[in-house]
Amino acid sequence: MAEITFDGVTKIFGDDIRAVDDLSLHVADGEFMVLVGPSGCGKTTALRMLAGLEDITSGTLSIGGSVVNNVLPKDRDVAMVFQNYALYPHMTVAQNMGFALKVRGLSKAEVAKKVGEAAAILRLTDYLDRRPKALSGGQRQRVAMGRAIVRSPQAFLMDEPLSNLDAQLRVEMRLEIARIQRLLGVATVYVTHDQIEAMTMGDRVAVMRGGKLQQCDTPQDLYDHPRNEFVAGFMGSPPMNLLRGSLESNDSGLALVLGSQRLAVPSNYATSHQLPKVDGPGVVFGVRPEDIEVLEHSGSDSLSTKVERREALGAEILVHLALVDAVGNDAFVVNDSGAVVSRPTTLVAKMGPRSGVSVGDQLQVRLNPDHFHFFDTDSGLSLRRSS
């Protein structure tokens, strides 16, 4: 078992394609680290450099305190689990799991012992004599993990191992992989594009975009305190509502201007955040869907909206709301020629499964003032002061 350190690691393809750009990241011994981000963000390239399958352009990569930039993949003592399983179809489960040990020259008794121990952990004992074609997708994935486990590597590397499974099986395997990793206590780097997987599995989550690390934190801190607008919009399902507005001062204090409406901003945000000047360049305002509730009457902390769409998901309803003007009309902005140049600002709210809202309903909604987020309009960085 060992810790892993990326220190300014960069990978350039061709002349100027920076797949990974100055990545610095530390994975503690026994930690489950998830790399997450959209397609092309560099997460798989980072994993492949760690495995030794891609050369490093610059920077230093260490495993267990030893620099491995020029160490061959077979000598890095890491085990990789791929999304396509890569099982030998003509071999049994036991033979697949023990193949690498056999190649290393271990005795039949040693191989059988290690395979038996891994099978017990993976709940595969009853399937050791079967071939891959006789297994379900989840069982094949566990065999692929078993092949990695028997080697007792310093670290596990997993490249979107659940992407080929159906939705229900993905949920089951998320729990299974997390259970096994905790049991073994081996440093694990797990790549996924699915932020739900990232939030539910990782001890910490590293969010990447365009080859750059955006933020690395615990799942809850990423959700509660996103460092920038991208992380705020990427982590969470549905994502955070992000609206452009401006700040103004009135007799009651600070207010956020959204279209033709004004929302009171509690005074504590003036100290906890580095807000722009009143009547200045404006801000990007963020609020999570679960922090929106329907009110009976309007108030300084509420907005007038109209239901545009509802999505019934069983346990909850996602309601798409358009901000409206004072008399309940859609807040379109038109130019001198009468052409629409700006459509209504919309919010997505989470409501209970039996909320009786319908498309076209006029609703007064309250945004939870304890969970406002503010971001810079140019850089996208959070305006929250460091604690």
Image: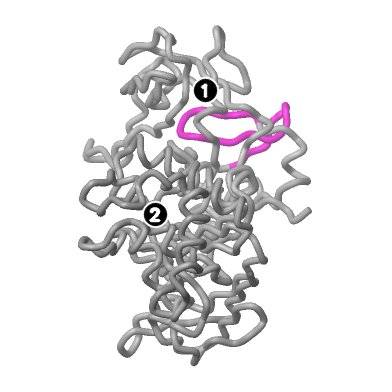
The circle on residue 303 is 1
Asked whether 341 falls inside the magenta stretch, the response is no
Residue 338: quarter of image: top left
Looking at the rendered structure, the kind of residue marked 2 is His
Q: Residue at x 54, y 60 (%)?
A: 206
Circle nearer the N terminus (2, 1): 2
Q: Is residue 51 visible?
A: yes
Q: Is residue 317 above or below residue 1?
A: above
Check disc 2 and report the residue beneath it.
193
> Residue 27: image x %, image y %?
62, 67
Scheme by which the image is coloured: one colour
Residue 116 in the image: x percent, y percent?
A: 48, 55
Q: Residue at x 43, y 36 (%)?
A: 238
Out of 322 and 313, give the one closest to the viewer. Answer: 313
Rendering coords of residue 266 (x, y %) = 72, 32
Local secondary structure at mark 1: strand
Q: Is residue 152 left or right of residue 57?
A: right
**Disc 2/disc 1 C-alpha distance (Å):** 34 Å
For residue 10, the mark is: none
Q: For the residue marked with disc 1, what is the amino acid?
A: Leu
Which stretch did the figure color magenta?
A: 247-264
Q: Nearer the viewer, residue 236 or 287?
A: 236
In the rendered image of this protein, does residue 386 appear above or below residue 138?
Answer: below
Element at label 2: loop
